[in-house]
Image (cartoon, helix red, strand yellow):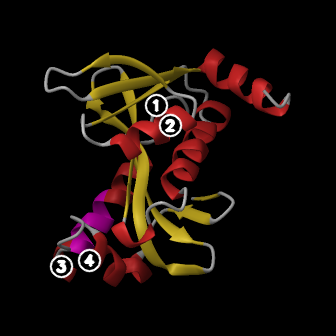
Amino acid sequence: MELLTKDLLLRTLTSDDLDETARMWNYPDGVTPKEAAEILKGMQDNLKKNKPGAIYHLCLGVFEKSDPKHIVGWCGLDGTAAPGQTVLFYIIDEKYRCKGYATQCAEELLRYAFEDMGYGSIQSGCAEDNTASYRVMEKAGMRLISRTKHGGYNFSIDYTDYFSRDTRLSDGV
């Protein structure tokens, strides 16, 4: 599976990505090649469980279009995090932050969830001190819905708000 943004390629990983998976999994510490092989197998098994409107877990490698073999982050949709919810996630390597990559990931995953998979709503969240992630969710059109018991933030966007946002953006609002 591949999704494209202005600057990025978001794609499922293969055995050709073993070294990159080992380097970037458990960022920034990495894992062994053997652990990376098990992770790749788990990702491939999870892909088989995904169905329209019911994503079990979708984890995509984030690559710059100019270097499609070097992972700069992870993103995806997780249907296992909370009962009845699908959660948007992303992490970008520190060397590649402040380029709008997390926002591009979030916007493309929301497009995929609503337009391709027929979702009704998507959630996400961040820690209280993660202002960059807070801004990513705002820019992607998500709304703050609550605070966590530890002071973090919970965001959500539903089908109607997603398509209303697209209309406003195309009208120049």
- Say which amino acid is labelled 2: Lys
The residue singled out by tag 1 in the image is: 54
Residue at 56% across, 36% down: 140
The residue singled out by tag 2 in the image is: 51
Residue 96 against residue 107 in the figure, above or below: below
Mark 1 to mark 3: distance in Å? Answer: 30 Å
Q: Earlier in the sequence, mark 4 or mark 1?
A: 4
Mark 3 to mark 4: distance in Å? Answer: 8 Å
The residue singled out by tag 4 in the image is: 22
Is residue 93 among what the camera can see? yes
Q: Secondary structure at mark 1?
A: loop
Residue at 32% across, 74% down: 21
Q: Earlier in the sequence, mark 3 or mark 2?
A: 3
- Say which amino acid is labelled 1: Ala
Q: Earlier in the sequence, mark 3 or mark 4?
A: 4
Q: Where does the magenta region start and end?
A: 36-42
Q: Secondary structure at mark 2?
A: loop
Mark 2 to mark 1: distance in Å? Answer: 5 Å
The residue singled out by tag 3 in the image is: 34
Q: Earlier in the sequence, mark 2 or mark 4?
A: 4
